[in-house]
Image: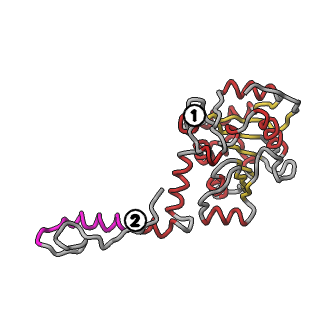
């Protein structure tokens, strides 16, 4: 995380008592002086915008996404591929997962795309942009183990990342049906690989428990057991678009249909 302390541009260099513009006998390279001035200016700009949702806060968001919320950081990378796979279904999107403000902001920049977000965990150090999204009701905080605060079929597509990994099958049996309830054209799940040590080491104090990374075979068996059908057409289009764009995801991505017939299920965790 970047320091909030501003850069002191009057810092002295060496023992001669001269600053950046010193006229000491030892001549300073003009290129070096210009470079130092530019570097100092960049640090100053980063500090000024840090607290207002600008350059500094974007760096902080990116840093967090590269850490605990690995698959949430994958969602913005996948947006161009999702647009090719889902087309019109990407017009009204709900993202569910940590750091959803970052993802929603990216989605809202897409042409003809409306986006909302659910943050399942406490939002710490939210920047000005995130606070604005919360005030407008675009982003909400909600425990996804309980019904989501939306009407049936409120969204065309629901994207969830870095959230199912913290749920046991007992709660998955409640959460996945609810995701299907509020969507019309499908659910896209971004989840970590079993050998992803970075995701496994997520902050327990924030999420309440360590992530449980399941294999693709575990997920496929689970979907079959709860009669949740995979969206083969969307999966094929996504794979084709990924190949053309040389896109290689860092997470597992599953495409599911919204229609489902749930029964009482007991799974071994």
Q: Residue at x 29, y 65 (%)?
A: 36
Disc 2 packing (10 Å; few <14; some 14–19; many ≥20): few
Residue 237, percent across and down? 68, 35
Which label was assigned to residue 42?
Answer: 2
Residue 182, percent across and down? 83, 47
Quarter of the view holding residue 28: bottom left
Q: State which region is magenta.
A: 25-41
Marks 2 and 1, the one that precedes in the sequence:
2
Residue 85, percent across and down? 69, 40
Q: Is residue 117 left or right of residue 148?
A: left
Q: Is residue 44 left or right of residue 175?
A: left
Name the chief secondary structure element in magenta: helix
Q: Nearer the viewer, residue 5 or 222?
A: 5
Q: Is residue 216 left or right of residue 6?
A: right
Quarter of the view holding residue 17: bottom left
Q: Is residue 92 above or below residue 130?
A: above
Residue 118, percent across and down? 73, 52
Quarter of the view holding residue 158: top right
In this rendering, the label closer to the viewer, 2 or 1: 2
The kind of secondary structure element at disc 1 is: helix
Q: Nearer the viewer, residue 218 or 245?
A: 218
Q: Is residue 61 above or below residue 36?
A: above
Q: Are marks 2 and 1 in contact (CB under 8 Å)?
A: no
Give the Cα separation between the discs numbered 2 and 1: 37 Å
Q: Is 24 one of the magenta-colored residues?
A: no
Q: How many marks?
A: 2
Q: Residue at x 71, y 54 (%)?
A: 117
According to the image, label 1 marks what residue?
Answer: 243
Disc 1 packing (10 Å; few <14; some 14–19; many ≥20): few
Q: Residue at x 71, y 49 (%)?
A: 120
């Amino acid at each position: 995380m970047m320091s909030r302390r501003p850069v002191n541009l009057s810092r002295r260099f060496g023992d001669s008592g001269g600053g950046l513009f010193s006229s000491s006998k030892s001549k300073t390279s003009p290129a070096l002086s210009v470079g130092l001035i530019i570097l100092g200016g960049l640090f100053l700009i980063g500090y000024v915008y840090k607290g207002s949702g600008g350059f500094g806060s974007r760096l902080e968001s990116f840093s967090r996404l590269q850490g605990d919320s690995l698959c949430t950081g994958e969602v913005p990378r996948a947006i161009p591929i999702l647009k090719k796979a889902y087309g019109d279904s990407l017009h009204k999107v709900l993202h569910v997962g940590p750091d959803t403000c970052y993802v929603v902001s990216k989605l809202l920049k897409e042409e003809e795309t409306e986006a909302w977000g659910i943050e399942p965990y406490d939002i710490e150090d939210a920047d000005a942009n995130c606070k604005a999204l919360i005030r407008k009701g675009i982003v909400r905080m909600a425990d996804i183990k309980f019904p989501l605060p939306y009407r049936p079929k409120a969204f065309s597509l629901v994207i969830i990342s870095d959230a199912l990994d913290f749920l046991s099958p007992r709660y998955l049996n409640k959460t996945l049906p609810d995701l299907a309830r509020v969507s019309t054209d499908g659910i896209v799940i971004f989840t970590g690989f079993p050998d992803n040590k970075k995701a496994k080491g997520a902050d327990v104090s924030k999420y309440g428990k360590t992530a449980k990374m399941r294999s693709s075979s575990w997920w496929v068996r689970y979907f079959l057991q709860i009669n949740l059908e995979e969206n083969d057409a969307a999966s094929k289009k996504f794979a084709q678009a990924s190949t053309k764009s040389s896109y290689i995801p860092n997470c597992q991505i599953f495409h599911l249909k919204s229609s489902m017939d749930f029964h009482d299920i007991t799974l071994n965790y």
